[in-house]
Structures are given as C-alpha cells and as structure tokens.
Amino acid sequence: MKYHILTESELDILNLLWETGQSMSRPEILAGLSDKDWNPNSIHQVLNSMMNKGILKVDGVARCGKGYGRTYAPTMNQTQYLLQQAGECMSNVPPRKRLLGVVASMVEDADIDAETISELEQLLEHRKKELGLG
C-alpha cells in the first residue's frame, strides 16, 4: 500500500474506528468525535480523501435518521498502519536491520514489563515453529 501523510482529522477518524472495532456511519463518527468542532457536511470531504488514499472503505449501509447512509471501515488495523509508517520512514534501511532496530528500541523502553516480554517470546516461538526452526 502506498504511504500517505494523514491529517489530524483523518487520524482522529481512524483512531475512533480502531477503538470501536466496527464500521460507522457519518453521524456515528461525528457523535464519536463530539469534542471536535466539525461541520457535519465537510466531513464528507475528509471521508472521501481517506477513501482516495486507500485507508478507508465503504463497508455497508445503515439507517441514518430518516434515510440510509454508508458505513466506513479502515482498510488496515492500527498495527498494520504503524508498521507501514515505520517502514516508510526507514525505507533505506534493510528489512532485517529495521526489524531488529525497532524491536531493540522497544525492548529497551523503561515501560516494558515482564508480561510484555513473555508475549514477545511467545510470538517469536510461534514464528520459529512456522519456519520449522523449533
């Protein structure tokens, strides 16, 4: 997928959709982001921009007041998005070195706990089995 720089509004919408874990209509998105001062009609421009960038898709149709409206869903989950962003920022670094650098950086973070380390170990063991290494 092509790398796109997202606006703050686009990121707000993506974060809302990731948090809820379900597709949402325009009125639901506006209600979920009620702390934002958006014109209900201008949100169409933001949603269309996101669809043009390939980060949002129409997922269905839902009842909206007296009529029906499209529901929207992200085309990737938050982890995929973050990996894409990191990959683009480090596109000149070989994949192996990029992975090791990112993981080492995260593991050295003071906020990492024993439970997280255990989960990382489980992920690595699972991957080793997939590759026939263990």
Image (spheres, rainbow, N blue to C red):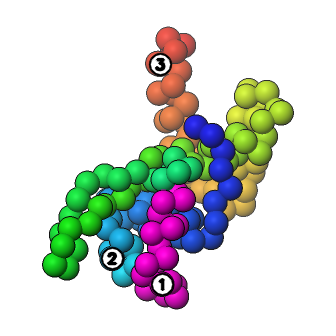
Closer-to-camera residue (23/118)? 23
Q: What SS does tag 2 mark?
A: helix
Q: Are marks 3 and 1 in contact (CB under 8 Å)?
A: no
In percent of width and height, residue 98 lies at 76, 35
> Which numbered mark, 3 or 1, is in the foreground of this view?
1
Name the residue at 31% across, 67% down.
25
- Does 60 sit left or right of 125 as displayed? left
Gap in angstroms between the C-alphas marked 3 and 2: 46 Å
The local crowd at label 2, few if under 14, some if 14 to 19, many if 20 or more residues have their Cα within 10 Å, is: some
The local crowd at label 1, few if under 14, some if 14 to 19, many if 20 or more residues have their Cα within 10 Å, is: few
Q: Which mark is residue 39?
A: 1
Mark 3 or mark 2, earlier in chain: 2
- Does 32 sit left or right of 62 as displayed? right
Gap in angstroms between the C-alphas marked 1 and 2: 11 Å
- What residue is pinned by disc 2? 27
Q: Is residue 58 magenta?
A: no
> Which numbered mark, 1 or 2, is in the foreground of this view?
1
Q: What SS does tag 1 mark?
A: loop
Name the residue at 46% across, 18% down.
130
Q: Examine the rendered structure and indicate whether residue 119 appears above or below residue 114.
A: above
Q: Is residue 38 magenta?
A: yes
> Which numbered mark, 3 or 2, is in the foreground of this view?
2
Q: Examine the rendered structure and indicate whether residue 48 appears above or below residue 43.
A: above
In percent of width and height, residue 95 lies at 73, 28
Q: Which residues are magenta?
A: 33-50
Q: Amino acid at mark 3?
A: Lys
Q: Is residue 107 visible?
A: no
Q: Amino acid at mark 2?
A: Pro
Mark 1 or mark 2, earlier in chain: 2
- What residue is pinned by disc 3? 129
The local crowd at label 3, few if under 14, some if 14 to 19, many if 20 or more residues have their Cα within 10 Å, is: few
In percent of width and height, residue 63 lies at 18, 69
